[in-house]
Image (cartoon, rainbow, N blue to C red):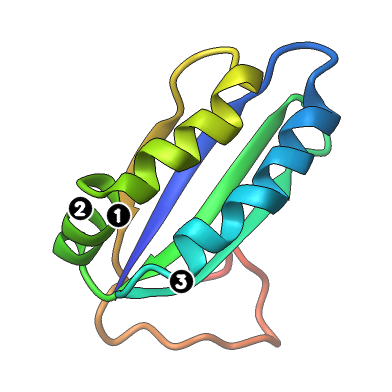
Amino acid sequence: MVLEVTLIDVLPGREGDFVNAYELARPLVATTPGCRSVRLQRAVESPRRFVLLAEWDSVEAHERNFRRSDRFAQWRALIGGSLAQPPLAEYFTDIQGQRHNPDRDFFTP
């Protein structure tokens, strides 16, 4: 499994338009074969910045089933008018052997 993290900066005053477009476009991603989950978060300190978090079976599943499909063109057509610049996306994987302990602070080793 990989986590796609995409930073999205929206044009000033277009935040509401972007959120509305995302709600229309979300099913294009969420129903793509190989997509496990997708969600959008908004920055508290920078309200024009959003982060899209999408879990995929693999990088290949994302590239083959979404990026190289008509779904991606539809996605960009819906959200593109609100973007201040091209989004910045990167893939992440879990560190093997790492366990989550909710009783420990985020930065505590």
Q: Decide: is 94 above or below 89.
A: below
- Where residue 37 appears, x then y in whole percent? 50, 73
Q: Label 3 vs label 2: CA separation?
A: 14 Å
Say if mark 1 contacts mark 2, CB within 8 Å: yes
Checking the image for residue 31, the label placed there is: 3
Q: Which mark is residue 106?
A: none
At label 1, counting other C-alpha atoms closer than 10 Å, the crowd grade (few under 14, some 14-19, many 20 or more) is many
Give whichever of 7, 18 is nearer the camera.
18
User: Along the horizontal axis of the image, is 3 left or right of 45?
Assistant: left
The disc, 3 or 2, on the residue closer to the chain's N-terminal end is 3
**Residue 77 can be seen, yes or no:** yes
Of the residues shown, which amino acid type is indicated by label 2? Glu
Q: Secondary structure at mark 1?
A: helix
Q: Residues within 10 Å of mark 2 (few under 14, many from 20)?
A: few
Please provide percent x and percent y for residue 62.
26, 59
At label 3, counting other C-alpha atoms closer than 10 Å, the crowd grade (few under 14, some 14-19, many 20 or more) is: some
- Which disc number belongs to residue 66? 1
Report how many numbered discs are placed on residues in the image: 3
Q: Are marks 3 and 2 in contact (CB under 8 Å)?
A: no
Can residue 47 be seen in the rendering of this structure?
A: no
Q: CA distance from mark 1 to mark 2?
A: 6 Å
Quarter of image, res 44? top right
C-alpha distance separating marks 1 and 3: 10 Å
Amino acid type shown at disc 1: Phe
Residue at point 75%, 24% (across, down): 48
How far across and how far down the image is residue 77, in percent?
50, 30
Q: Which mark is residue 63?
A: 2
